[in-house]
Image (cartoon, rainbow, N blue to C red):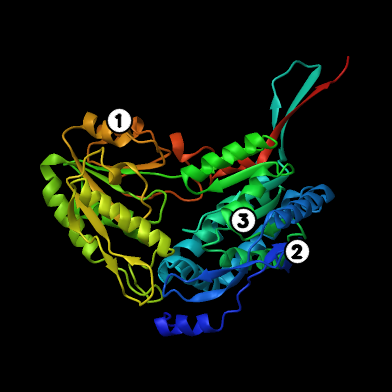
């Protein structure tokens, strides 16, 4: 087994990277039609990594037309499931082969610790493609119950052209969650990565072609939401749109669908997830570590971040002390340093947003228990300390709005009913946690929480076998598991008269 890479090893590898900075349309890299580019800036130190093609409406149209041609040609859409399976398994193997490179692209592009990029993001993306490929030829149609003179068939068919818009916090993994089931079910895809983190998606396009995905089936169009995302959402020849990102943008995409061709729209949006700790939690040290990790992991740039910590009043002060001690050990360091617990926020704009929310927490009367300031492990980078507020009331801004940064709001409660009221008093419903040794209470509270994922005595559980998505304004539809196939297929009923 080779020795673990050092920071110097990663930096040397970064110096040898050959970045893909062009759009990928119809099986080849291409400039934006008007030649426009944007600077791809690393939040680690503010350095410009490269100039990436800034796609606009004309480029989107080129990509959609390529996707439509490939879909109608049938080389992929009509291929036997076994062939699509082998191709996606090959793609999973290629991602694994280039895992260090892809992890490095993620870290340089959006600032997450390299260990997390390599061992979580890329590993999960590999698993996503491999699991979905293995599952795709095990999804059967149905036969309706009929009389002897009829035959009712229920079959699934691919949507057609799918537009996918993915965020910057888990660039490759969120793309994998969309791409794997969309491709598995025979669709052609136009992917718009975030302009804040486009590099891994552009490299993935090349690996997909190497795996054998035909020209035009997978296209990548980097650009801003206004210039590239909106034309994709409005395009009359896109049959389905899938999105992970903010609730505000999700609402705009729904409007775009209504203003265009009523394309199917599936959204995974924001969250303000409650993590509820009862006095009878089986292991308070474990719960405190999970509470800190749940909001500081990935710099808090996680839609399921455990950003509201609800603690039974009798143990609140002692439990808060444990969380603060855990948080002190998660100070940001250089993201290429192995073992770094936190890295940089994605850019200066996000760092300023987080600091503004911290200012609101102070102004509204919450007590700062940890952090609250910028950090500077690397000059020129976008870093914020892990931050904890005590004495937060449910009506405080930091308890209601998604911050998407390393900021924890601690709220006391007196009994189970109050905990549920506070937990559900939000426009969101993505995830929630419950810590208790009482089995009946665990079931009652889990059932009472209006959230798509509920974790009992841990945080952020599940794998590719479990669906992921939210209630209320956290979105609709589900990623992962066999349920993900529902978003990328139409269900057709065929009724046959068998005659006399």
Q: Are marks 2 and 1 in contact (CB under 8 Å)?
A: no
Image position of 72 with respect to 293: above or below: above
Between discs 2 and 3, the one toward the N terminus: 2
Work out whether mark 2 precedes mark 1 in sequence or the reverse, and give the earlier one: 2
Could you tell whether 231 is left or right of 381 in the image? right
Query: Does the image show residue 470?
Result: no
Give the percent coordinates (x, y) of residue 301. Answer: 40, 56
Q: Mark 1 points at which residue?
A: 444
- Location of residue 16 (image quadrant): bottom right
Mark 3 residue crowding within 10 angstroms, few (<14) / some (14–19) / many (20+) = many
* Circle 3 residue: 192
The quadrant in which residue 26 appears is bottom right
Label ID, residue 395: none
When the figure is inspected, residue 355 is found, relative to residue 448, above or below; the finding is below
Q: Is residue 240 above or below residue 492?
A: below
Element class at badge 3: strand
Q: Residue at x 65, y 63 (%)?
A: 91
């Amino acid at each position: 087994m080779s020795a673990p890479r050092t920071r110097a090893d990663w930096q040397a590898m970064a110096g040898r990277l050959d970045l893909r900075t062009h759009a990928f349309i119809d099986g080849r890299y291409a400039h934006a039609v008007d030649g426009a580019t944007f600077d791809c800036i690393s939040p680690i130190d503010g350095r410009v990594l490269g100039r990436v093609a800034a796609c606009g409406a004309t480029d989107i149209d080129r990509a959609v037309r390529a996707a439509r041609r490939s879909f109608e040609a049938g080389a992929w859409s009509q291929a036997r499931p076994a062939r699509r399976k082998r191709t996606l398994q090959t793609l999973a193997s290629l991602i694994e082969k280039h895992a260090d490179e892809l992890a490095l692209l993620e870290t340089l592009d959006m600032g997450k610790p390299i260990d997390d990029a390599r061992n979580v993001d890329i590993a999960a993306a590999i698993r996503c493609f491999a699991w979905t490929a293995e599952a795709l030829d095990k999804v059967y149609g149905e036969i309706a119950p009929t009389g002897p003179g009829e035959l009712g068939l229920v079959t699934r068919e691919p949507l057609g052209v799918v537009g996918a818009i993915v965020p910057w916090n888990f660039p490759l993994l969120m793309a994998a969650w969309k791409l794997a089931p969309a491709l598995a079910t025979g669709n052609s895809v136009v992917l718009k990565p975030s302009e804040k983190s486009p590099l891994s998606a552009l490299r993935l396009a090349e690996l997909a072609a190497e795996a054998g995905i035909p020209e035009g089936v997978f296209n990548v169009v980097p650009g801003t939401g206004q210039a590239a995302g909106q034309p994709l959402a409005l395009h009359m020849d896109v049959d389905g749109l899938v999105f992970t990102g903010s609730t505000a943008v999700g609402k705009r995409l729904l409007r775009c669908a209504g203003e265009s061709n009523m394309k199917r729209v599936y959204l995974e949006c924001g969250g303000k997830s409650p993590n509820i700790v009862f006095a009878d939690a089986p292991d308070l040290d474990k719960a405190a570590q999970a509470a800190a990790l749940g909001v500081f992991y990935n710099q808090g740039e996680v839609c399921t971040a455990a950003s509201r910590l609800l603690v039974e009043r009798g143990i609140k002060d002692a439990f808060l002390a444990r969380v603060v001690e855990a948080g002190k050990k998660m100070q940001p360091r250089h993201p290429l340093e192995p073992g770094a617990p936190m890295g940089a926020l994605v850019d200066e704009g996000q760092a300023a947003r987080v600091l503004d929310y911290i200012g609101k927490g102070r102004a509204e009367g919450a007590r700062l228990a940890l952090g609250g300031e910028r950090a500077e492990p690397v000059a020129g980078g976008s870093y914020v300390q892990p931050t904890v507020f005590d004495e937060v009331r449910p009506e405080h801004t930091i308890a209601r709005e998604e911050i998407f940064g390393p900021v924890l709001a601690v709220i006391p409660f007196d009994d189970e009913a109050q905990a549920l009221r506070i937990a559900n008093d939000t426009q969101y419903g993505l995830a929630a946690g419950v810590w208790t040794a009482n089995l009946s209470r665990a079931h009652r509270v889990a059932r009472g929480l209006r959230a798509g994922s509920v974790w009992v005595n841990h945080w952020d559980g599940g794998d590719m076998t479990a669906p992921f998505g939210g209630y209320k304004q956290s979105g609709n539809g589900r990623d992962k598991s066999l349920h993900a196939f529902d978003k990328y297929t139409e269900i057709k009923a065929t009724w046959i008269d068998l005659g006399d």
